[in-house]
Amino acid sequence: MKFSIISDAFQKMEATSKRLELTDILVELIKEIPEDVISKAVYLIQGKLRPNFEGVELGIAEKLVMKAMSKSSGIPLKKIEEDYNKGGDLGQTAENILQQKIQTTFLSETITLERVYETLLKISNLEGKGSQEMKMRYVSSILNDATPQEAKFILKILLGTLRLGIAENTVMDALAIAFTGEKENREVIENAYNVSSDLGKVAQVVSTGGIEQIRKFQIQLFNPIRPMLADRIKSGEETVKKFQNDFAAEYKLDGERAQIHKQKDTIMIFSRSLENITSYYPDIVEKISKLIISDDVILEAEVVAMNTNSGDFLPFQELMHRRRKYEIDEAVTKYPITVNFFDVLFSNGKNCMEMEYMERRKLLEKIIKEDDFARLIPMSIINNEEQILEVLENSINSGCEGLMLKHLNSTYRAGIRGSNWLKLKREYQNDLGDSLDLVVIGAFFGKGRRTGKYGTLLLATYNDEEDVFPSICKVGTGFSDESLDQLYQILSPKVTLKKNPRIISDMAADMWFEPELVIEIVASEITQSPIHKTASDKIKENTGLALRFPKFTGKIRTEKNAEDASTDEEVIALYKVQKKTVNQK
Ligand code: AMP
């Protein structure tokens, strides 16, 4: 397939920020893609080569790309650097430069999608001695044959700067429309995505087998399942009202969620955002096989740092010491952990997600041989407020954050946040000393000690109905020098030239970011706001909600995706409770 078909569509997408138009362009594009390359095309559309959990990293030094441009165009490096410094986007520079190309290649070949994909894959696999030289050769060879527009998009993919504003949801909508003719079928497609986390694979199945085949989509070991998420609840009273009957109360531990896949002695561990985190936990790999009585299994657990002397749980931050490439053995000894199981999704060839909570819990109890390292999360079956308070108190006393309350008849719904699981944290009871997880969408330049860093950040909630990120506040307090540095490192690669269409804000930020990073914020109050867009029109017309005196808690929630941030609904709920409390005073 000609790559120009893709790059023409990308060009049109760049020119719009309307989600419906984006979907239409995508549908037309997808209809033109042959079955045998659909998965590759879907990865490229999302600016990647493989599903995220495989960790295939794209990327190349900018200097190298400029040299390659110079080589294939005959234009001096200095001129290329000048153009780049003006605009700050190498893809765009490539388009500008190739338009003025001096050397013309008489025998230039038409570039195919397959060639672009294979070349990028080869580049991402190159490592070690001589790899830089090889990368440059690959780039300049493809630039020799590329049109200026193709070059722009190839480089944007390679540099990780392709920002078309296409969310996974948009791709799924487009797949449903293109292959089944009905947007409503998106749900079936989403189910397949929820158990595979691989949109390329899903696209391939629906393109070859249609809706029938995608309905039969099966769980596969070592493909992570998108985790089930919980709604917040503010009081025991509300819980009892919601559940009515008996329900399960589990301790809510403050650690890292781990989805553990095991087939015989092979272990793979995925984080909540489906990153492969196996290498950070060699102790789990070493010890866990002996403690699981099932040949092939997918389990969920909360990994928590421990003080082995006192037996106390330590806060989530301690686990971050494990996030390193080298000397991991030292970190394993210095920062010991326990693995606390709470669910089973697959066992001995059987999908357990359709089983009800109690059945899954009983199976889990059979599968896990508990010891100091591997445990089951404490659980009790209760039905009234008094019992909730008692278990909550016990959980807090043993160093937990609160409770997870689970409906006894609920199945495991992958990728879904719903009211079958409720989280009750201690602080929720006296709102609003509560924290929110917000998405960093923009920044304002810093002054004084913050010069050259982002002084103030613009934050957003997640509006899950419309799949957008409305702004809720600016935050400039709570930052240590260290956290300012860290945020700068993480955020600079996420800078975009234009505001991502999923960001809803009227603020004039100095910078816009891809909505990806989540940080934790506390605030003194939620107020109505004519400026901010969270819950816009929900409480009052032309008015949104904003945070008063927001402060960064120091927690960068790298384990969360932007779609896991606090939602508009959650903020509305907090706002209402707060109003009630104020009125009662
Ligand atoms: P939050 O991160 O505040 O949205 O809370 C949900 C997270 O709590 C999950 O993603 C898990 O990492 C964690 N968690 C701790 N204990 C449990 C439990 N018993 N059941 C489910 N999740 C738990």
Image (spheres, helix red, strand yellow):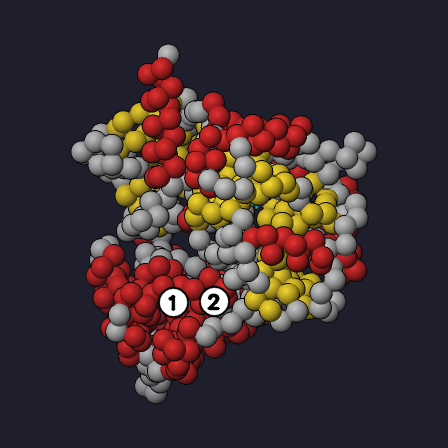
Q: Residue at x 31, y 25 (%)?
A: 527
Residue 102, compared with residue 554, is above or below; it is below
State which image quarter holds ligand 1.
Answer: top right
The image shows residue 331 at horizontal and vertical percentages of: 74, 45
Tell me which corner region of the image, top left, top right, bottom left or bottom right, holds residue 386.
top right
Residue 263, compared with residue 355, is above or below; it is below
Q: Three-letter amino acid code at disc 2?
A: Asp
The secondary structure type at the circle numbered 1 is helix
Residue 29, compared with residue 375, is above or below; it is below
Tell me which corner region of the image, top left, top right, bottom left or bottom right, holds residue 160.
bottom left
- Which dot marks residue 198? 2
Find the residue positioned furthest to the top.
585
The image shows residue 387 at horizontal and vertical percentages of: 58, 31
Find the residue positioned furthest to the bottom.
107
The secondary structure type at the circle numbered 2 is loop
Q: Three-letter amino acid code at disc 1?
A: Val
Q: Quadrant of the N terminus?
A: bottom left
Q: Earlier in the sequence, mark 2 or mark 1?
A: 1
From the image, state whether disc 2 or disc 1 is nearer to you. Answer: 1
- Which dot marks residue 188? 1
Side (left or right) of 537 relative to 60: left
Find the residue positioned furthest to the right.
309
Q: Quadrant of the C terminus?
A: top left
Side (left or right) of 8 relative to 390: left
Q: Residue at x 51, y 56 (%)?
A: 411
The image shows residue 467 at horizontal and vertical percentages of: 33, 51
Q: Residue at x 69, y 31 (%)?
A: 398
Tell me which corner region of the image, top left, top right, bottom left or bottom right, holds residue 22.
bottom left
> Is residue 72 shown to the viewer in this render?
no
Q: Residue at x 28, y 43 (%)?
A: 504
Badge 1 crowding class, 10 Å Cα cut-off, few under 14, some 14 to 19, many 20 or more, is some
Who is closer to the viewer here, 433 or 342?
342
